[in-house]
Amino acid sequence: MQITDGATAARTFAELMVSDEPRPEYADSYQPFAPLIGSWDLDVAWYDETGAVTRRTKGEWHFAWVLDGRAVADIWITPSRAARATDGDGEWGLSIRIYDPELKAFRSTWMGPKAAFVMPFVAHATADTITLESQTANTRWQFTGITETGFHWRNEDEDADGNIILRQTFVATRQP
């Protein structure tokens, strides 16, 4: 067995993971996520049960074509790397999204390693919204107002009485 240094292994992994573009046969299916490819600065807000903002911080979100152009992945970081000195050690989350032609929808899994949290979603897209419905909790994530320069994202839970509770919002601005 050949032992490789960590830097070489990381470069090889990154080269294998990230793709320059979607494979041609996937390009149409992935159109809803295409405008998100790139890096984004976030204004992040958390809300309590009454809808009042309890915390604000900066974040960052990075989207890329991955797995030979057959999927979309993102890395979500809050607080942002630049804000960690003042806002503390938050979370780095990873999502992988694949298109399922039988469902005519995306299968998406979010992983948050800090709390060892994994949440699978099914995502549907309309002309101006991508909605991800959790398969294990009463949670919905939505991307809205997607343009070349920005978008909005929200995390909502549904309580036992069917009330929607806003948990978190992001206002995203594309990094230069």
Image (tube, rainbow, N blue to C red):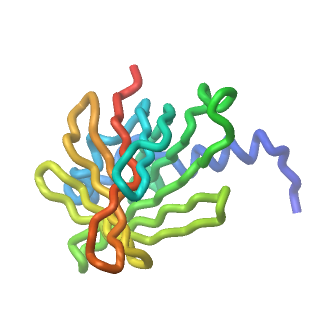
Where on the picture, by quarter, is residue 15?
A: top right
Instruction: Farthest residue to the front: give it.
Output: 50
User: Residue pushed farthest left?
Assistant: 127
Q: Nearer the viewer, residue 30 or 146?
A: 146
Task: Note whether residue 91 is visible.
Answer: yes
Residue 145 locus on image (x, y percent):
19, 41
Q: Is residue 122 above or below residue 70?
A: below
Q: Position of residue 172 (x, y in %)?
A: 35, 34
Left or right: residue 38 versus residue 18 is: left
Whether residue 167 sits left or right of residue 123 in the image: it is right
Please tell me in which quadrant of the rendered image residue 2 appears: bottom right
**Residue at left 45%, top 52%?**
73
Judged left or right of residue 25, residue 72 is right
Q: Locate residue 6, reporting x and y percent.
A: 80, 45
Q: Is residue 25 visible?
A: no
Q: Write down the quadrant of residue 147 in the picture.
A: top left
Q: Quadrant of the C terminus?
A: top left
Left or right position of 108 against 34: right
- Height in image: 147 above or below 28? above
Q: Residue at x 22, y 51 (%)?
A: 31
Total numbered labels placed on residues in the image? 0
- The N terminus, quarter of image: bottom right
- Which residue does the image show at 44% across and 71% down from the upper left? 120
Question: In the orientation shown, which residue stands out farthest toward the top?
Answer: 176
Q: Residue at x 51, y 47 (%)?
A: 75
